[in-house]
Image: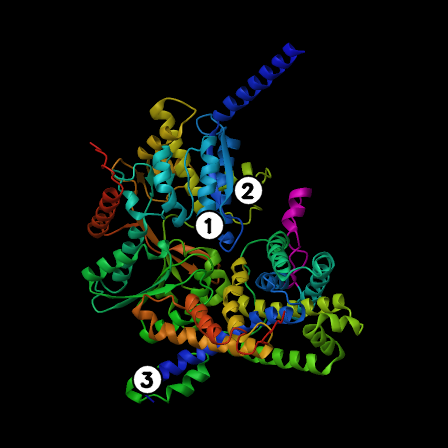
Amino acid sequence: MPVELLNVIEVMLNGLMAGIMYSLVALGFVLIYKASGIFNYAQGVMALFAALTLVGFQTGQVPFAHLINVIFGTHIEYWSDGLNTFVAIILTIIVMVILAYLVERFLLRHLVNTEPIILFMATIGLAYFMEGLGDLMWGANIKALNVGIPSGGSFWWEDVTKTWAPAEADYYGMYIDVLDVWAAVIAILLVVSLTLFSQYTKTGRALRAVADDHQAALTLGISLRTIWVIVWSIAGFVALVAGIMWGSKSGVQFSLSLIALKALPVLILGGFTSIPGAIIGGLIIGVGEKLFEYWIGPLIGGATENWFAYVLALVFLMFRPQGLFGEKIIERV
Amino acid sequence: MKYIKLLFTTGVTLIFLAISTMASAELVFPSLSYRTGPYAPNGIQFADGYEDYFTLLNERDGGIGGEPIKVIECETGYNTEKGVECYESTKGQGALVYQPLSTGITYQLIPKVTADDIPMHSMGYGRTSAANGKVFSHVFNYPGTYWDAASIIIKYVSDQEGGDLNGKKIALVYHNSAYGKEPIRTLEELSKKHGYELVLLAVDHPGQEQKSQWLQIRRDRPDYVLMWGWGVMNQVAIQEAANIRYPMDKFIGVWWSASENDVLPAGDSANGYKAIAMHGVGDDFPIYEDMRKHVLDAGKAAGDGSNLGTVLYNRGMYAAMLAAEAAKTAQEIHDTRALTPSQMRDGMEALKIDQARMAELGLPNFGPEINVTCENHGGPGLGAIQQWDAGAKQWSLITDFTGADREIVDALIMEDSDAYAAENNITPRDCG
């Protein structure tokens, strides 16, 4: 195979992997929007908060240490050498469930039957509150995150693909980050689990009922409040997964909340209400932006990925306003 | 009753006047910091170093020349609009010098500080051509500029290659902003002189996703990769370089891509990464004994003390030291303890610090000698190369401080500052 073709395949493959990473963030948005019609602006911050909490448990950091030290004049920072990663993940999930309960108890419960824009604004407030809370609890310094997932270029894949090029081409072989492969596997498991959960469990069916028609679900005795807590808990779990994968790449730091920006074009393209749409949308955005950067980027100064993803999503929007897999909403007066 | 009211009003007015007179006797140094947002990990370290040095002077020496120091902190979040708001809200409080720690804010403040007669120090950042003091009367960027940094890195790379860069390929991975684009012109001019090929790779803010850039580096196989990054862009770039197994000792960052924050997340794979330094590294300097005794142990530190000796803490401390020395110079020039911003500007323009003075300050050989003049606001323009040891988790300087290619850099500074003067109808000052 000519090296140029192999390069294009490599770019596409890495685009697919990047797309999976975007999908992991987009999934959380879809879950909440599907069940409650809320566009959760705080999803990126939830990923940050979950990752901060995980590292805090892993390293044995005392929450609110800075605040405690200022008030009581102490110098505490760590309460132990830290917890086993598995235990830390379980505890973080519990924290995210508690957070979901608190969001429902103190925010959503008071905003039932209000306009979607009010709910959206409430999530903006929630995002800033959680960012401040995360800072206060765990500090603003950058934290290395290691949950044992291998990372770096795959030697095996390089060796396999090296032989695909002519011997005289001095081809390095194709690059693929092992961490991205793991992210893909985890994303597939996540989507399959979520689909099975929503199709074959009683709670899952209740979730779908609420998503289809709030009023009808209420008449059947389904508690909207319980469903919201469950949905926000699941979105919190998805945020933790996204936080782990992105945090493993760059360390856990406050810019992690900006990964939400990469999920928006995915949502526009895939639809706000479709779990498979979040995955397919992510893959299309990932491959599209990487190929554009590869072919057109050098001609126009590069750094095209951020804006091209939105352009691509807007083009789809012109033909399918509800996104590729979104539900077409017809309102009659 | 009427007279009682009048007496009361007069009394309150007099008390306010007395308080304001007392306040104006303090030397006010605003700290335009960012302790929140995506760039907070870097902003906190710098702000802590800046504030702690002034606290040290207050606690140990009673201020500067016997005049107490007041630091006013204003949160910019590394946001240009907020930075300008901070400037506007603090300039009336006797602010002596602004250090925005952001190239974007610096660009916005250049015309404002000049009009308000308040000096600004963009130490190793901001608009490089502000080094021409004839055009930029109120802006200082000593001890070095971006263009000095680019030139010194190329000089180092050239030394590594036996003095010959002809036919070599050098890639620049840069933050797609005014800051990141600063070195491009210099590197282009240097490529004409040395014969290397320059490959430009822009990374959009914040830089969390850089797969395309590093795949291209893997395909193009440049001999060296330079980086002009900030915040998460640095950490991701170093991790991606490690992932594609790019040799770390051929990956060199500017001094804003050179902190512990940038290398620690990548762990052992960051070992050998290099960057240019504008000052010394670590905490093996006598000043730290005083800092621990008078500031940290006294419970007066700006942070929790864990940042002492980090690159950006040292830089904040260095920035404060340069400001304090300029204030001292201004006090001597104008024979007064209380200073106005205009007098502070004079002090900055006459700042001279030799190694003997650095040793007196507890910072022997921490940085190069400084000699600011009316023409040269950019300082000596020296830099050294520092390298990261992942095992020991520390930086060490691996070269002496060396100078930039003045022939190229000075010509570019003149060209750019002349263009600025023409655009803004500025008549360059006569520096005698």
On the image, the x and y values in percent for residue A266 come to 51, 72
The answer to if A80 sits in the magenta stretch is yes
Query: In the image, which residues are magenta?
Result: A56-82
Q: Residue furthest front?
A: A333
Amino acid type, residue under disc 2 in the picture: Ala
On the image, the x and y values in percent for residue B358 come to 38, 38
Look at mark 3 in the image and give the residue it sits on.
Answer: A3
Image mark for residue B302: 2
* Spatial separation of the CA atoms under disc 1 and disc 2: 22 Å
* Spatial separation of the CA atoms under disc 3 and disc 2: 56 Å
Image mark for residue B355: none
Give the letter of the chain under mark 2: B
B358 relative position to A284: left or right = left
B113 relative position to A264: left or right = left
Callouts 3 and 2 in the same chain: no
* Spatial separation of the CA atoms under disc 3 and disc 1: 44 Å
